Amino acid sequence: MNNFELRAAGQGFRSIAGLDEVGRGPLAGPVVAAAVILPSDYHNDEINDSKKLSPRKRKRLYHTILQDALAVGLGLVEPELIDRINIHQATMMAMKKAVASLPRKPDHLLIDGIHRIALPISQETIIKGDSLSISIASASIIAKVTRDTIMEEYHRQYPEYNFGKNKGYGTKEHEEAIRSHGQCSIHRRSFRLKSLEDVFKTGDLFEP
């Protein structure tokens, strides 16, 4: 899991940040990105893509990473701005915010996916990087737990949508709640339901 970090270190980089985001697909809530700089040669066999971990294990590793990391940065973009600039641009903005919020400046970024961000820093994109790079995997855990906590807080404000369980994703229960109660302040107005019923009603075949 640290081959990319070791290779970057071998190229002379000394402050390597892993970068990942969570929340591109939900119908509600923010997109959240995290950047994590780990000590050189850091090793933890339990750290992996956040999607492959149980909620309990994610939370435990979240605290471990916060304790062990040299620096952690977060970036959030709220639903209103997502609707204005689209989810891709919002994701890139969240990643830039995460890097900017790091308490120490990175000289190299390892980014999950295929898209570089508009920053004058050396970068490497890695497809499925959250399963291949320990720093990206750490960022995925930090971003996921942070976003889940935000959505659990929104659940207390809007219990009818059960955000504590669905975290804003388009589950059948969540879609039914939207039909019953309409959208609340944290729903992404530019996103559409994908059920056949909505296709027939609106002509929308997919969500952004």
Image (cartoon, rainbow, N blue to C red):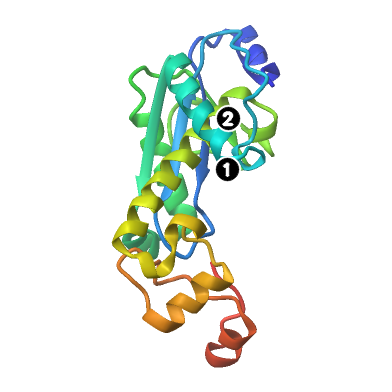
Q: Position of residue 36 (x, y in %)?
A: 47, 25
Q: Position of residue 171 (x, y in %)?
A: 57, 67
Q: Nearer the viewer, residue 63 or 101?
A: 63
Q: Position of residue 3 (x, y in %)?
A: 70, 17
Q: Would residue 152 appear left or right of 129 to someone viewing this image?
A: left
Can see residue 162? yes
> Earlier along the polypeptide chain: callout 2 or callout 1?
1
User: Which circle, 2 or 1, is nearer the viewer?
Assistant: 2
Give, as a three-letter code, the residue at label 2.
Answer: Ile
Q: Secondary structure at mark 1?
A: loop
Which quarter of the image is occupied by the N terminus?
top right
Q: Secondary structure at mark 2?
A: helix
Q: Which image quarter: residue 103?
A: top left
Q: Would residue 177 appear left or right of 200 to someone viewing this image?
A: left
| Disc 1 packing (10 Å; few <14; some 14–19; many ≥20) | some
Residue drawn at x 51%, y 28% is 60
Residue drawn at x 40%, y 66% is 188
Q: CA distance from mark 2 to mark 1?
A: 14 Å
Give, as a three-letter code, the residue at label 1.
Answer: His
Q: Nearer the viewer, residue 174 or 95?
A: 174
Mark sitting on residue 184: none
Which quarter of the image is occupied by the C terminus?
bottom right
Q: Position of residue 165 (x, y in %)?
A: 50, 57
Q: Which residue is mark 2?
A: 136
Mark sitting on residue 115: 1
Residue drawn at x 42%, y 68% is 161
